[in-house]
Image (cartoon, rainbow, N blue to C red):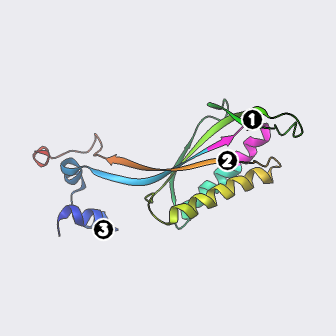
């Protein structure tokens, strides 16, 4: 079998005897994953507690059948995004519809699964349900939470600290 094909199709590529550095230098390996971006409200102090609960849930997903491989979020201290939605604010449910302000934190989650995998839909739905539950459990239920899944392709290149065989790149 071709060393590249063996490396790419093996569940344990480190045991194939292939030199990853040479393979990366010659063909460039890509890592295909799914990235989920959640737009989470952080307008009220109680939202920070719900956010903490969401992070606890995320950390527990490392042992799930489709594990989370990493996550990032924008600052909680001064939320990075200002969001607006059309409707009646929670503090005036009988009032006139208008643009309602929300401070927004982005939570970015990476899964080691390709977007086309049939399990993605279930994983994202479970995540969204858990987010709704975290807000509801803190007595600040949300009408909507935006959760979007994207396909990402990360170029897997050798570290600057790894030596690259210059002959392999010619």
Q: Residues within 10 Å of mark 2 (few under 14, many from 20)?
A: some
Q: Which residue is mark 1?
A: 43
Measured Cα–Cα span from mark 2 to mark 1:
14 Å
Quadrant position of the C terminus in the picture: top left
Tell me the tag on residue 164: none
Label 3 packing within 10 angstroms: few (<14), some (14-19), many (20+): few
Residue 144 part of the magenta-drawn span: no
Q: Nearer the viewer, mark 3 or mark 1?
A: 1
Identify residue for label 2.
145
Left-right relation of 148 to 96? left
Looking at marks 2 and 1 on the same chain, the residue that comes earlier in the sequence is marked by 1
Give the residue at x 70% y 51%.
53
Q: Where's residue 149, x and y in %?
A: 52, 51
Name the spot of residue 22 as percent of width and height, x first.
Answer: 19, 52
| Numbered badge on residue 10 | 3
**Measured Cα–Cα span from mark 2 to mark 3:** 38 Å
Residue name at image x 79 percent, y 54 percent: 137
- Looking at the rendering, the stretch of residues picked out in magenta corresponds to 39-52
């Amino acid at each position: 079998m071709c060393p590249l094909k063996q490396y790419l199709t093996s569940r344990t590529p480190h045991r194939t005897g292939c030199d990853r550095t040479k393979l990366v230098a010659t063909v460039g390996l890509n890592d295909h994953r799914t990235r989920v971006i959640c737009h989470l409200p952080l307008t009220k102090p109680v939202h920070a507690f719900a956010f903490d609960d969401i992070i606890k849930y995320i950390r527990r997903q490392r042992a799930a059948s489709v594990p989370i491989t990493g996550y990032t979020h924008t600052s909680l201290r001064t939320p990075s995004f200002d969001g607006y939605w059309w409707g009646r604010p929670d503090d005036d449910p009988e009032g006139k519809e208008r643009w309602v302000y929300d401070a927004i934190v982005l939570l970015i989650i990476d899964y080691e699964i390709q977007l086309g995998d049939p399990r993605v839909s279930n994983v994202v739905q479970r995540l969204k349900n858990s987010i709704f539950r975290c807000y509801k459990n803190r007595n600040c239920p949300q009408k909507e939470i935006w959760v979007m899944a994207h396909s990402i392709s990360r170029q897997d290149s050798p570290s600057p600290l790894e030596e690259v065989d210059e002959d392999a790149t010619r």
